[in-house]
Image (spheres, rainbow, N blue to C red):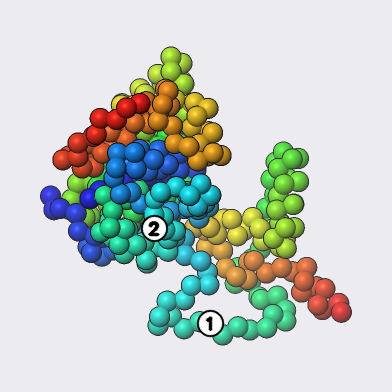
């Protein structure tokens, strides 16, 4: 067995770490990683796969808390839940997190 | 000198409590202790800041920076305590890779045991990939002695062939008060348990370490 060598940690464990979710803030862009050009959102992106309805029941107090937390974050409950799932490692895209309420309001004005 | 990483893929198992106890008792023993808070909630950093505790603390949740941050603290201190997020993340893997000892807290619940097994398995994987032994021990927190569930959890730990710190951290008010008043218990049952847990952990992380005899 080898002794502790911190310089080898990243190299030795990168394959194992790659199977885990990241904690890096989305705003961090590493050198060499070109930031994607921002496109104005004019209409809902065409989903690459069909959308399905998904519902489940929960305690009323939890539902109220979820409603409050989403409102505090100025996002829909759907986006709030999907964002939490993204943090757990699910492949949630930016399109999945679009707030369709704002688009509808923009289109209506 | 020593790096102790506190890890569990379950939230609320007692990671930050153990971190506070280790830091407090390290300072009491005259060791230069520092903390690296890799938890998105940064509870440890906030606690140290609020109570002006005598430890250097850094927050680093970015897995591309965590190893160098731990290394810098390790060069300047006798003990570095790394508090990780309540989920298996890339930063946790690297924090485990840096450690002399990984402590895995678990409370008396099935979910805690399940996640402790997963975390110990992760440490073993990291140990194999690093080609060096990374010691790992579970620490029972929120312990309720002489209860059937406590006996059952101890049995489950044995069945899963997980090694444990023999000192149990009981479900004591002093540990909860510490989160509000910043006072790490050094007297009474909580102080005795914290000191014993610290001594066990240090003996594993740094075999040459000798505890100072302190008046209680």
Quarter of the figure with the C terminus of chain A: bottom right
Residue at 81%, 77% (x, y): give it.
A106
The answer to whether residue B162 is visible is no
On the rendered structure, is B112 left or right of B137? Answer: right
Q: Return the x and y of residue A71 as percentages of the image width and height.
A: 75, 58
**Which label number is shown at residue B91?**
2
Q: Residue B98, image x and y in percent?
A: 28, 54
Task: Establish whether labels 1 and 2 are both on one chain.
Answer: no
Relative placement, left or right, of B150 versus A62 is left
Name the mark on residue B178.
Answer: none
Dot 1 alpha-carbon crowd within 10 angstroms: few under 14, some 14 to 19, many 20 or more: few
Helix, strand or loop status at disc 2:
helix
Front residue of A23/B79: it is: B79
Whether residue B16 is visible to the viewer of this picture, yes or no, is yes
Q: Chain of mark 1?
A: A
**Residue B195 lies in quadrant:** top left
Look at the picture and state if A66 lies above or below A13.
above
Tag shown at residue A36: 1
Decide if residue A83 is on the left or right side of residue B152: right
Judge left or right: residue A62 versus residue B21. Answer: right
Q: Which is in the foreground here, disc 1 or disc 2?
A: 2
x, y (%) of residue B72? Answer: 30, 62
Which chain letter matches label 2?
A: B
- Name the residue at 76% across, 40% down: A60
């Amino acid at each position: 067995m080898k002794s502790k060598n911190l310089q080898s940690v990243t190299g030795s464990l990168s394959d194992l770490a790659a199977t885990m979710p990241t904690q890096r803030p989305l705003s961090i862009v590493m050198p060499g990683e070109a930031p994607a050009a921002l496109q104005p959102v004019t209409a809902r992106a065409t989903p690459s796969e069909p959308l399905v309805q998904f519902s489940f029941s929960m305690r009323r107090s939890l539902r109220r808390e979820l409603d409050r937390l989403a409102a505090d974050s100025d996002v829909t409950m759907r986006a709030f839940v999907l964002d939490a799932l993204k943090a757990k490692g699910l492949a949630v895209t930016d399109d999945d997190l679009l707030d369709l309420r704002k688009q509808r309001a923009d289109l209506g004005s | 000198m020593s790096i102790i990483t506190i890890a569990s893929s379950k939230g609320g198992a007692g990671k930050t409590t153990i971190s506070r106890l280790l830091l407090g008792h390290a300072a009491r023993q005259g060791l230069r202790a520092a903390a690296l808070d890799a938890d998105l909630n940064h509870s440890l950093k906030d606690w140290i800041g609020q109570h002006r505790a005598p430890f250097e603390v850094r927050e680093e949740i970015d897995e591309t920076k965590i190893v160098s941050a731990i290394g810098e603290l390790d060069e300047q201190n006798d003990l570095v305590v790394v508090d990780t997020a309540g989920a298996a993340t890339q930063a946790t893997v690297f924090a485990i890779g840096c450690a002399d000892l990984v402590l895995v807290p678990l409370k008396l619940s099935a979910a805690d045991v399940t996640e402790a097994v997963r975390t110990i398995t992760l440490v073993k994987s990291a140990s194999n990939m690093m080609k060096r032994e990374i010691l790992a021990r579970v620490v029972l927190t929120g312990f309720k002695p002489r209860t059937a569930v406590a006996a059952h959890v101890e049995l489950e730990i044995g069945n899963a062939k997980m090694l444990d710190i023999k000192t149990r951290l009981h479900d004591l008010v002093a540990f909860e008060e510490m989160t509000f008043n910043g006072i790490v218990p050094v007297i009474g049952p909580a102080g005795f348990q914290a000191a014993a847990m610290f001594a066990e952990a240090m003996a594993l992380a740094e075999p040459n370490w000798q505890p100072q005899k302190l008046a209680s």
